[in-house]
């Protein structure tokens, strides 16, 4: 006999819990496939906004209207806090900071990136192009994807960080202290904000309820081009294991509904990554493959339309397998191929 699952609190109930703590979710539209981004207004001193939404008139309008439902205006904001470097989270930064005069808090390593945002996004796109070519994505496809990247750049924004944050810092407001925790993986600058007293975690895209947060391979923030390719999934798994230890009762995320059982969610994500790694290892039974060939077998046309995302995912799993000694790499004409090692168990 199976017992019916005890229903957890509904998203409305969890958002009511957050509102009681003075934290209001403001869902702002984005032009990206992920849909709306959640910004959070914290009624405290200073009056705080976590993330801004992308740089578009529509997002600005909706953000203003959402603030108005809490009888607030952009001009009243006193502190803007960023969870990470992606455009859907910071595109309105320059406009909001100018109109409000708010301080801007973000991870210190993000400050130079934001100061020259456009140049850095261009360098990120070039870096992604090189990774794609190196892993077997045809040149005509990388060219198309590059053009899409250029079209999206306008949704970002530069900005000046006036309160640089470091891992472990306390961001103290009148009614609460938010512990600043660096949790790279989805991006190099992922930062989460932990209210130990209320057991509320503001997590940006570090954890999302409805989709597995993508460990995108990103250019290192220190810009060292000679550094080896980042192992984003390995980094991300380490970050998730650290977050798993927090006794959070409510996790407020950058997209979609809040999370009330982050331990179960993280365990599910870890299982998913193990399964995918095993599936990729089985594919290599038939002989060496490039990461792009693996992505095509895993996801078909999605590996074309979402080439960088799926490539990042596959490379992450290959990194896990390589660390376990189960795959190794070799190059043919500057394109990386992966093959199973004799250590890999023969798959039936
Ligand atoms: Zn996002």
Image (cartoon, grey):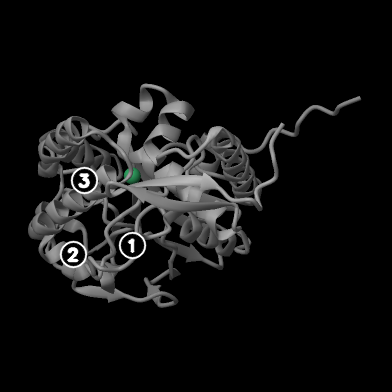
Horizontally, is 111 left or right of 173 in the view?
left
- Determine whether 325 is above or below 61 in the image: below
The N terminus lies in quadrant:
top right
Query: Observer-nearest residue: 105 or 271?
Result: 271
Q: Earlier in the sequence, mark 3 or mark 1?
A: 3
Q: Earlier in the sequence, mark 3 or mark 2?
A: 2
Q: Which residue is mark 1?
A: 189
Residue 279 is situated, as x and y percent measured from the top left of the image, at 59, 36
Camera-side mark, 3 or 2? 3
Q: Which residue is mark 3?
A: 129
* Circles 3 and 2: CB atoms closer than 8 Å: no
10 Å crowding of disc 3: few (<14), some (14-19), many (20+): many
Q: Which residue is mark 2?
A: 113
Residue at position x 64%, y 44% from top?
Answer: 271
The C terminus lies in quadrant:
top right
* Circles 1 and 2: CB atoms closer than 8 Å: yes
Q: Is residue 20 visible to the viewer in this orientation of the structure?
A: no
SS class, disc 3 = helix
Q: Is residue 43 visible to the viewer in this orientation of the structure?
A: yes
SS class, disc 2 = helix
Furthest residue to the top? 301
Q: CA distance from mark 3 to mark 1?
A: 21 Å
Query: Observer-nearest residue: 232 or 180?
Result: 232
- Determine whether 269 is above or below 144 in the image: below
- Determine whether 67 is above or below 299 in the image: below
Q: Quadrant of residue 25?
A: top left
Query: Observer-nearest residue: 121 or 29?
Result: 121
Residue at position x 17%, y 70% from top?
Answer: 112
Ligand 1 location (quadrant): top left
């Amino acid at each position: 006999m199976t017992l019916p699952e005890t229903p957890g609190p509904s998203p409305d109930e969890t958002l009511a819990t957050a509102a009681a703590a003075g934290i209001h979710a403001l869902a702002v539209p984005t032009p990206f496939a992920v849909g709306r981004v959640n910004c959070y207004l914290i009624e405290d001193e200073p009056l705080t906004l976590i993330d801004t939404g992308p740089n578009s008139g529509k997002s600005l309008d909706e953000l203003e209207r959402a603030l108005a439902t809490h009888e607030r205006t952009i001009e009243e904001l006193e502190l803007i806090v960023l969870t990470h470097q992606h455009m859907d989270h910071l595109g309105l930064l320059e406009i909001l900071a100018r109109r409000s005069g708010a301080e801007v808090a973000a991870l210190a390593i993000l400050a130079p990136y934001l100061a020259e945002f456009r140049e850095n996004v261009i360098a990120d796109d070039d870096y992604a192009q090189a990774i794609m070519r190196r892993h077997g994505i045809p040149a005509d496809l990388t060219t198309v994807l590059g053009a899409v990247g250029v079209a999206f750049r306008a949704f970002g924004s530069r900005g000046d960080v006036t309160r640089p944050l470091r891992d472990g810092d306390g961001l103290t407001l009148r009614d609460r202290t938010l512990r600043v925790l660096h949790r790279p993986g989805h991006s190099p600058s992922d930062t989460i904000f932990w209210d130990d007293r209320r057991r509320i975690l503001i997590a940006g895209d570090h954890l999302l309820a409805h989709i597995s947060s993508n460990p995108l391979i990103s250019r290192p923030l220190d810009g060292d081009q000679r550094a080896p390719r980042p192992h984003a999934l390995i980094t991300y798994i380490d970050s998730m294991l650290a977050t798993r230890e927090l006794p959070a009762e409510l996790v407020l995320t950058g997209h979609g509904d809040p999370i009330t059982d982050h331990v179960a969610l993280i365990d599910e994500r870890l299982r998913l990554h193990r399964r995918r790694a095993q599936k990729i290892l089985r594919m290599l039974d038939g002989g060496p493959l490039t990461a792009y060939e693996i992505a095509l077998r895993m996801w078909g046309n999605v590996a074309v339309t979402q080439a960088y995302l799926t490539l990042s995912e596959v490379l992450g799993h290959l990194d896990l397998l390589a660390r376990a000694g189960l795959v190794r790499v070799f190059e043919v004409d500057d394109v990386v191929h992966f093959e199973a090692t004799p250590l890999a168990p023969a798959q039936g």
